[in-house]
Image: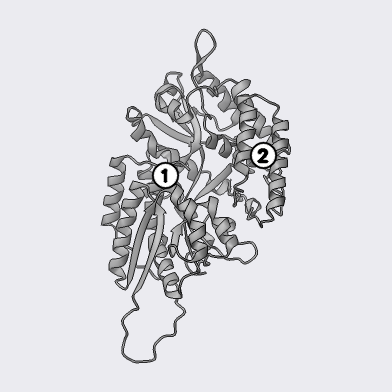
Amino acid sequence: MRPMRMDRRRFLGLMAGAAAGTALAGCGPTGTSVAPTAAVEQEPQQVELEFWDWDHEPRVLFTEQLVAEFMEQNPNISLKYNPLGWTDIETKLLTVATAGSGPAFSNVHYFWRYDLQRAGVLAPYPDDMFDWSGLLSTPFNRDPETGSIYTSDFCWYCDMVFYNEELLDAEGIKPEDIPKDWDGFIAMCQQLTKTDSSGKITQVGCSLNDYWAREWLWHTLVYQQGEFLYNEEGTEALWNEEAGVRALQFMQDWYHKLKIDDAEFLSHFDGFGNEKAAMFIDQGYMAAGINDSFPQLVGKWGTVETPTFTGRPDPSWGMALPEEGFCVFNTFDADVIDAAFKYIKFMLGSEERRIDWALLMDGPPDEVALLDNPTISEGDEGNVIASQANTMEWRINYGERPLEAEKFWRTMFDEAILENKDVKASLDSATEQMNAALKESGKKRYIVERAYEPPTS
């Protein structure tokens, strides 16, 4: 994940709204200590605990406000907030959590959560913490063996199309004209692609020039065909089956047959920002940096939903990923664990808080009933949240992303896109290596993509 940015005007507006709102009083899970028998009311026991989070300025400022409000309402709890760099948390968390020497709870990205779960250091969320039936994440977060849930999700991210209004308008295209099916979309991309007299691309129709954009989209294209990436047991990758081959061939053709992008051109973000790419495809976390990095684009860009092969959402619109929430570590005393869950419920347990986080993070909230909330729409610049939220009930979360997979995918994309090699051969090699790694590791994998059930309409 790349660091996110938010323009100052929007951040100050969010902070003002949050400060004016009434804070939700936390009502945490019941502790394990025995109630005193004396008739005289006793002072609550003092509890001290620490938590870790990403060091991202808008998020830090908002969280500092939440922590202050929480401690004012809970004077017996001293909460130390420690924002750290992404790499610091990644390298330290598993070690300190296993030793019981780190924070009582932490923001944990979904890349890492499964190793912590396998290590047995996570405390399960109380059954009455949230209305789990109303959350998008529940089918994918619930442990298939124990039924426990070990995390919470602030919001979601999924792929969508970012467009430059002026470059579309120059071709007589309005945002509502952007096709919902891939065939129509490709034709529009070709119309938007410009070349010089030598045939070299000078304006990309739609850019995929970023590793992460390619990884996310390839997964989406497999799911759009109604297929999965792994077998039912999560023990074997199915990447080189027909759906995976078709998806990778589609992406290779994007460059070498359809010629709507050039692998030697600018990255998708820089191409878009410098108005050399009419559109690009990536997830919602990219949105926050556009206005800050390219102020000339303020008010000139927007988003729409990713096309599908059929123009319909079924059988799936593709992949979605959670912006991972907090995990609580079971290596601490019960009163500390209770205080951790109490803060998390304060931070995330109301519609107002979930809306705050959605606007701060540019991602749809986890609560199904809030996906079309008008308050979110009012603050949704470029329709970034809406373009993701409109597709969320048709999206699949695969659960664990095996950390070994990335190096195989990177080689696969380099061979298919940079070197224009046979896609089936590249997929066969990547799949063989992944299955060898799965077998060698001997780890139980939390592949939960088949928990997906499409809506009835």
Residue in front for this viewpoint, 258 or 383: 258
> Between marks 2 and 1, how big is the CA–CA gap?
27 Å
Mark sitting earlier along the chain (2/1): 2
Residue tagged by mark 1?
Answer: 362
Q: Answer few, some or many: residues within 10 Å of disc 2's Cα (few below 14, many 20 plus, some between 14 and 19).
A: many
Residue 263, percent across and down? 55, 24
Task: From the viewer's perspective, tell me whether residue 4 is left or right of residue 225.
Answer: left
Q: Which one is closest to the eye, mark 2 or mark 1?
A: 1
Horizontal and vertical percent position of residue 23: 31, 62
Direction from residue 258 to residue 102 in the image, left or right:
left
To which quarter of the image does residue 246 belong?
top right
Give x and y (percent) for residue 355: 39, 52
Q: Can you see residue 79?
A: yes
**Which residue is depicted at the point 45% across and 46% down?**
363
Identify the residue at the far top of this view.
197
Picture coordinates of residue 57 (x, y %)?
33, 47
Residue 35, placed above or below residue 146: below
Q: Which residue is mark 2?
A: 225
Question: Which amino acid does the dot numbered 2 rest on?
Answer: Gln
